[in-house]
Image (cartoon, rainbow, N blue to C red):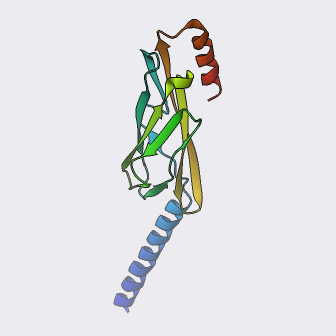
Amino acid sequence: MQRISIGLLIATLATLGYGSYVLSTAAVAPTVQIVGGNVARLGSTSFNQPITHEFKIINPHPFAIGLFAPQAGCACTTATASASSIPAHGLARVVLHIDPEDGAVGGSASIVTVHGKLSTETRLFVTAIMSGAPGHRRARQWRHLEGH
């Protein structure tokens, strides 16, 4: 009789433990941490030189999350991700590349992370100041940044 009670107790605790794990991971939004923050201020750069910045994305959760391909905020920006998922407590990289031919001195992209039916959108921003730009271009550059 005592063996059955101990076996039943162990089975009950195991079931409750697994159930609480499922509930704790299923109801958590797949947020991420961005090393250094989601805004990269690169300071001054040469006029009409391409701008590239790599963001390090950390998954703080004890479960893997999906990472959709990043979506650039405008035509002057391209964005790529190093992976389509981030393992538990793992790292992925997202690179933003801005082509300044149209006077752009900044760019943005959105990343969407997913876990189950939940998703989270995170925006990434890169800004810089072009040195040697004609005065009329500077005003246009700041207007371009306000649109991001």
The quarter of the displayed image where residue 73 is located = top right
Q: Please name whichever residue, 90 or 27, is drawn nearer the observer in this view of the structure.
A: 90
Q: Residue at x 47, y 9 (%)?
A: 132
Q: Please name whichever residue, 55 or 1, is drawn nearer the observer in this view of the structure.
A: 55
Q: Residue at x 45, y 34 (%)?
A: 97
Q: Residue furthest top?
A: 135
Q: Residue furthest front?
A: 101
Picture coordinates of residue 118 (x, y %)?
58, 57
Looking at the picture, does residue 64 appear above or below residue 111? below
Q: Residue furthest bottom?
A: 1
Looking at the picture, does residue 107 appear above or below residue 111? above
Q: Is residue 147 left or right of residue 12?
A: right
Picture coordinates of residue 72 (x, y %)?
55, 40
Give the position of the C terminus as an image quadrant. top right
The quarter of the displayed image where residue 117 is located = bottom right
Picture coordinates of residue 147 (x, y %)?
65, 27
Q: Is residue 93 left or right of residue 130?
A: left
Picture coordinates of residue 52 (x, y %)?
42, 30
Looking at the picture, does residue 48 appear above or below residue 111? above
Q: Please name whichever residue, 138 or 65, is drawn nearer the observer in this view of the structure.
A: 138
Q: Residue at x 42, y 49 (%)?
A: 59
Looking at the picture, does residue 98 appear above or below residue 61? above
Give the position of the N terminus as an image quadrant. bottom left
